[in-house]
């Protein structure tokens, strides 16, 4: 499977400061990605948002940061920078069972931080038009905590396929209820939470949405295929193996956990809902400010 290099550039690593004696050290624990959305007033201007999971921001059942801030580690030239944000700046989906958080970024994208455009979101209508579903190949880009890159971020790519469509709620690790996610056959480990998941459109179909930027077309096997953002990884399941379940005779290993190979993916539709929610908040604040000015 061909993975365009610029796709890895939409990813940043989510970090927090846990050590009161070493404020410069950031513990990397998840993945975020940058998207661009056209402004409603003029299509020539765009707004930028970092997207990750709600649990990467709230850190429920995990050590809390000492400064209540979230740091996004992004590549910049030969090194990296930290984009600092307050946890209160992140907008959560109004439905607590939707594991999505977005951060309105007022910065300007640069060479090593490239946003993925709203036109490439694989919403339900796009999936229907593209006839995408179970069995289609997907890939995720994100943090591998055992090798994240010393001088620059080194996001890894994991490949799999859609195993189940978002037909009903599931109970994920930690007994979290997740509203109608995709299930994909793809290993997802700590650090991959929040990773964007992509799927290619069918090269035999030509009814693609209008306004598709040329730079998110990918060339593979002499055909042009459109690349879509399916959603973001929430987590995965492990199963506990006991010695009685070992198939190799003579093994004396104790209890251990084995990755089931199935990851939970939050549909991109929920990201759209959160972005629209954030947009309404801004409109409401602008309206209130206008009223105050009139008074």
Image: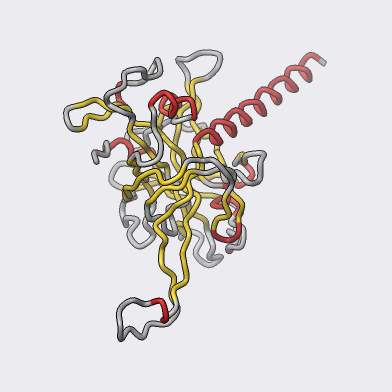
- In the shown orientation, is residue 239 left or right of residue 148? right
Of the pair 152 and 240, the residue shown nearer to us: 240
Q: Is residue 190 above or below residue 284?
A: below
Q: Is residue 214 above or below residue 80?
A: above
**Residue pictured at 59% horizontal, 31% vertical:** 273
**Residue pictured at 56% horizontal, 65% vertical:** 20
Q: Is residue 141 above or below residue 187?
A: above
**Residue pictured at 46% horizontal, 60% vertical:** 25
Q: Is residue 209 above or below residue 152?
A: above
Of the pair 54 and 87, the residue shown nearer to us: 54
Place of residue 131 in the rendered image (x, y in percent of width and height, measured from the top left): 39, 28
Does residue 17 appear in this view? yes
Place of residue 150 in the rendered image (x, y in percent of width and height, measured from the top left): 32, 57
Place of residue 135 in the rendered image (x, y in percent of width and height, measured from the top left): 35, 41
Tally of marks = 0
Of the pair 52 and 206, the residue shown nearer to us: 206
Place of residue 178 in the rendered image (x, y in percent of width and height, measured from the top left): 58, 48
Look at the image and name its color scheme: secondary structure
* Residue lying at the far left of the rendered structure: 222
- Quadrant the N terminus occupies: top left
Does residue 72 appear in this view? no
The quarter of the picture where residue 226 lies is top left
- Quadrant the C terminus occupies: top right
- In the shown orientation, is residue 213 left or right of residue 172? left
């Amino acid at each position: 499977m061909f993975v365009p290099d610029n796709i890895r550039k939409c990813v940043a690593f989510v970090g927090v400061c846990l050590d009161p004696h070493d404020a410069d050290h950031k513990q990397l624990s998840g993945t975020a990605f940058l998207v661009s959305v056209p402004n409603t007033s003029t299509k020539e201007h765009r707004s930028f948002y970092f997207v990750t999971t709600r649990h990467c921001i709230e850190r429920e059942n995990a050590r809390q940061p000492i400064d209540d801030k979230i740091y996004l580690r992004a590549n910049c030239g030969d090194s990296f920078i930290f984009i600092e944000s307050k946890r209160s700046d992140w907008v959560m989906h109004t439905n607590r069972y939707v594991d999505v958080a977005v951060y309105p970024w007022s910065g300007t994208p640069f060479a090593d931080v490239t946003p993925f455009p709203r036109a490439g979101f694989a919403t339900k209508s796009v999936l229907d038009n593209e006839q995408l579903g179970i069995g289609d190949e997907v890939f995720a880009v994100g943090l591998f905590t055992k090798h994240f890159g010393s001088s620059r971020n080194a996001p890894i790519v994991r490949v799999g396929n859609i195993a189940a469509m978002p037909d009903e709620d599931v109970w994920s690790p930690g007994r979290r209820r997740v509203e109608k996610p995709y299930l994909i056959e793809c290993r997802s480990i700590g650090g991959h939470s929040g990773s964007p998941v992509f799927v290619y459109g069918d090269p035999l179909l030509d009814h693609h949405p209008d306004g598709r930027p040329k730079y998110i077309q990918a060339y593979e096997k002499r055909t042009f295929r459109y690349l879509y953002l399916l959603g973001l990884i929430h987590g995965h399941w492990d199963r506990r193996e006991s010695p009685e379940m070992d198939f190799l005779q003579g093994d004396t290993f104790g209890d251990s956990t084995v990755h089931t190979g199935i990851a939970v993916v939050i549909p991109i539709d929920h990201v759209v809902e959160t972005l629209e929610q954030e947009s309404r908040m801004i409109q409401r604040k602008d309206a209130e400010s206008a009223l105050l000015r009139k008074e």
